[in-house]
Every structure is written in C-alpha cells, then in structure tokens.
C-alpha cells in the first residue's frame, strides 16, 4: 500500500468510526435536526481538542503530517479500544516492520510434527499456510494437493466450501477473522500481495465484500471453535496462535482439544484413518 493509499484507508476508517458512534455515547444531545445518527465532524474535532479544518483534511485523505498525540486524542474522542487506537497510528505514521522471507526452518517443521494429533500449521504475514502437520490435513483437507494460492487462512474460510460446512457458527468466526486480518494488512501495508488476495476474496465472497470495507479491527486472541467433522463427528478446540520470535511475519496456529470433550479420542481415530 503506497503512502497515498494509507491516507485514504485512514480517512475511510475515521469516517466509518464517526458514523457509527452515537451522540449519546459521548455525552452529546441527540437533537432533532440530525440527518444521520453518527457524530458530526465538528463534534469529533471539539471532543478531541483539534481544529475542524485539520480533522476534515484527515477525513478527505489529504497528505498531512499527523502526530501520535493528535491521533491518540482522536481515538479517545471516538471511543476506540487499544486495538482500534493502534490502527490509525499504523496507517498515519507508515509504521512497518522489517520484512523477512516467509520461510519455515526444519526446526519449525519438526515442532509442527511434534504436535501429534493436534492440528497445527504455520502461516506467513499474508496468512498463507506455509507448513502443516498431518493432523491439520485431517481437519482442513490435504494442503499438499491444494493450489498454492488457495493455501491461505482467509481463502480457507471464505473460498473453501468444506470449511463453511463443518465449522459451527461460521459467520461469527469469519467476521472476526476479517477484523484480525485488517491488522496484518496494516502492519505489512507495503506488500502488494495483500491486495492480490483481497481482490480474489472480493470476487468470490459476498460476506467479505460486506465486511472488509467496514474497517473493523480486532486483536488475535484464543478462540473457541467447534467442527462437525464428516468422519468422526464433533471436534471442540481452543485455537491458540503463537508468534515466531525469529520472524515477525510467521505465526504458528494450534487447535488445542478442549478437556472434557471426546475430541482427543476422535482425533486419534482420525489419525488412524488418515494414516
């Protein structure tokens, strides 16, 4: 994403945040002359202690200098949480980490194998699935036979019909995933391959077309998931994501079976069937 594109993303994010924040939420009277439910630009500027002109330029996507203090004040005025506050800072200040190649060492591959019956994979900065264990193939399908461009967490969610069929509460998980991916998109905004992936998703998924422009952002946290596997039945996991210290772009995702459920026994059964 080029610098001008970053300013446009920031402008869109601020407009949408302002439009969805009710006056009552910030202690302002609703009034009867409002044409829209959200806040006015001048109200946001007043709450943040900045000039209306300067805030207007921000929403217009102009290439202006933006301080961290001003953006923090805006985030406070717009009732953003910690994750949402970092979003405009990332866009405005062109903060991108040093990029390393998305490569998986033999040690990391061995670590995946050692997860045994627990499905696990390593994804890169664009959420491409770079390495996996056999248990992950038993749950999500054989990654080795998938086209390379389809071995991606977002594509697996939105472009793979099997995932939609077996993942309970698909809508909730898919919507959360979009918010989490937005953070990666901002972090590695100089990587053009992100835009290629987004274009593919926009062409195949009505849900992604609806959710992506909303600019929702969400931190990646442990996530409870239930799968209705066609061969072994219900599998219940706590999905955990681990940052790879040596490469900021790599993460290992592990589906940890929930205690007190028959998931471990069914994963053992699945391993026997696929072995």
Image (cartoon, rainbow, N blue to C red):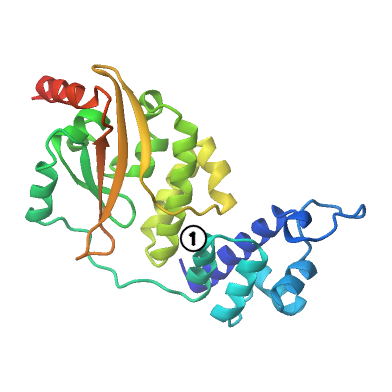
Q: Is residue 2 left or right of residue 67?
A: left
* Count of numbered marks: 1
State the residue at coordinates (29%, 49%).
Answer: 241
Quarter of the rendering occupied by the N terminus: bottom left
- Residue 204 in sight in this render: no
Determine whether 94 is above or below 110 in the image.
Answer: below
**Residue 38: where, in percent of width, then height?**
76, 55
Of 28 and 59, nearer the camera is 28
**Residue 242: where, in percent of width, then height?**
26, 53
Determine whether 3 is above or below 207 in the image.
Answer: below
Q: Is residue 156 left or right of residue 211?
A: left
**Residue 30: where, in percent of width, then height?**
85, 54
State the residue at coordinates (45%, 63%).
Answer: 186
Extreme residue in the front direction? 260
Callout 1 crowding tier (Cα within 10 Å): few <14, some 14–19, many ≥20: some
**Residue 35: where, in percent of width, then height?**
86, 52
Quadrant position of residue 200? top left
Quarter of the rendering occupied by the C terminus: top left
- Residue 196 in sight in this render: yes
Of 249 and 30, nearer the camera is 30
State the residue at coordinates (47%, 69%).
Answer: 90
Residue that label 1 marks: 83
Of 98 and 202, nearer the camera is 98
Quadrant position of residue 79? bottom right
Determine whether 79 is above or below 91 in the image.
Answer: above
Q: Is residue 104 left or right of residue 250?
A: left
Q: Is residue 172 left or right of residue 227?
A: right
SS state under label 1: helix
């Amino acid at each position: 994403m080029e610098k001008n594109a970053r300013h446009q993303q920031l402008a869109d994010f601020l407009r949408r945040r302002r439009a969805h924040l009710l006056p009552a939420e910030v202690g302002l009277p609703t009034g009867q002359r409002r044409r829209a439910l959200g806040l006015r630009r001048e109200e946001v500027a007043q709450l943040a202690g900045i000039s209306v002109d300067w805030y207007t330029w921000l929403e217009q996507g102009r290439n202006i200098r933006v301080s961290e203090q001003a953006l923090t004040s805006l985030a406070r005025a717009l009732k953003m949480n910690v994750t949402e506050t970092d979003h405009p800072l990332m866009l405005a200040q062109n903060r991108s980490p040093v990029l390393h190649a998305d490569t998986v060492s033999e040690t990391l591959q061995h670590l995946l194998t050692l997860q045994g019956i627990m499905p696990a994979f390593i994804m890169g900065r664009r959420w491409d699935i770079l390495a996996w264990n056999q248990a992950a193939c038993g749950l999500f399908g054989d990654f080795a036979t998938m086209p390379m461009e389809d071995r991606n967490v977002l594509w697996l969610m939105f472009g793979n019909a099997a995932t939609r069929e077996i993942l309970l509460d698909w809508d909730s998980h898919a919507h959360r995933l979009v918010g989490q991916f937005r953070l990666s998109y901002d972090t590695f905004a100089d990587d053009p391959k992100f835009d290629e992936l987004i274009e593919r998703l926009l062409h195949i998924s009505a849900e992604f077309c609806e959710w992506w422009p909303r600019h929702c952002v969400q931190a990646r946290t442990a996530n409870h998931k239930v799968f209705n596997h066609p061969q072994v039945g219900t599998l219940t996991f706590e999905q955990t994501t681990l940052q790879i210290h040596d490469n900021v772009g790599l993460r290992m995702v592990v589906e940890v079976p929930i205690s007190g459920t028959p998931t471990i026994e069914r994963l053992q059964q699945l391993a026997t069937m696929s072995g």
